[in-house]
Amino acid sequence: MAFTTLAAGSGVELSYTDSGVPTESRDSYTTIVAIHGMCFTNLIFERMKAVAYEKGIRIIAPNRRSFPGSTELSSEDFNVLMTGGTHEERDTMIQARGHEIATFIDTSIQTLNLCPISDDGQSGGIILLGWSLGAALALAAIAHSTTLPIEARGRLSKYIRSLVLYESAPIVLGLPTPEQNWAPLVDTSIPEALRLPAFGQWCTAYFDHGDLTKRDLNSLSWVLGSKRRVPTIYNIPEAQLKEMECYGPEAISDLPFLFHFAKQLEASYRKAFYDPEILEAFPKMKLTYITGDKTGAFGIAGLWALQDDEKEAGGKRPVDYRIIPGINHFWHWDEPEKALEGFLACA
């Protein structure tokens, strides 16, 4: 399979898909840069990409490092992910991954002729969308953008209009994991080689939770999916599924990354959301956390954890919290038009 790539730093290329410039709004369209999560490549955004053109929106979806077409991580970096390395090595690595996403966006701005934020702030610009684990990279990109060259910082400031965290578990933000948490990834009764594939299927389910207005973690369905709606994975054609599923070396370091890099993930989240330097660097950037009420419990727990944390750490930029009725972790696949409209509404 041939891949299209863009430079994301010295010696680093990220492969990407691109819906292209929408003809009827070519001077004012908004671009969504979507960062994928665990187990699934950027091709998980294909159904949303297919309807973006007619909606007057552009979608660019890079593959993370080591995923198909993108530059593989070095053996040294892979070892740090798997073992945790030293504090200094973890700090260096999270900054490098953030720089790569930010540089990819900056390269896109320069080579793909993206539209900047309009004068009234109502159109153009970029919505940086971090889905699931992808939010960790989106947050790192914003948090560490202030250490990029000044020209790149200036361009990013004129283009990034919104940062959207899309169903990220508390652990992705470096926040404590609820004691109720369960996922196939952490169930040691499942053979190790099957935990990623089991997670890849389980997380596509719909879940029936209790009354969410009570904000009670015990009311969430942490394990069992709903019988009322078929999991998304059964709606993905087999040929496409084979192209987008990743359970090999490119994916096995994701869970250790979340465990070992908790302090770095928390620092990225807090700086991106609440640091005055970032507020000054991105004065027009809106912050949103979005989740469905039928998604895995981790997505709803992430929203509640962020709400609680904002009460203590919140700054001058408000966070918009959105719970979308009826959707699961794969809104972008099951309802691509509605998902596009929902993400655009966050800008």
Image (cartoon, rainbow, N blue to C red):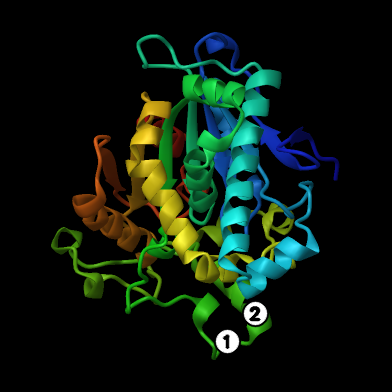
- Residue nearest the observer in this picture, 336 or 292: 292
- Residue nearest the observer in this picture, 226 or 135: 135
Where is residue 334? Give x, y as percent: 49, 48
**Residue 297 appears left or right of 192:** left
Q: Which mark is residue 207?
A: none
Q: Which residue is the site of mark 1?
A: 190
Q: Which residue is the site of mark 2?
A: 194
**Residue 16 appears left or right of 338:** right
Where is residue 68? Give x, y as percent: 76, 51
Under mark 2, the amino acid is: Leu
> Which residue occupies 40% across, 45% down?
271
Q: Is residue 293 visible?
A: yes
- Compared to residue 251, the image places residue 329 above or below, namely above
Where is residue 190? Give x, y as percent: 57, 87
Residue at disc 1, secondary structure: loop
> Which residue occupies 78% across, 48% down?
71
* Quadrant in the picture for residue 288: top left
Under mark 1, the amino acid is: Ile
Q: Are marks 2 and 1 in contact (CB under 8 Å)?
A: yes
Residue at disc 2, secondary structure: helix
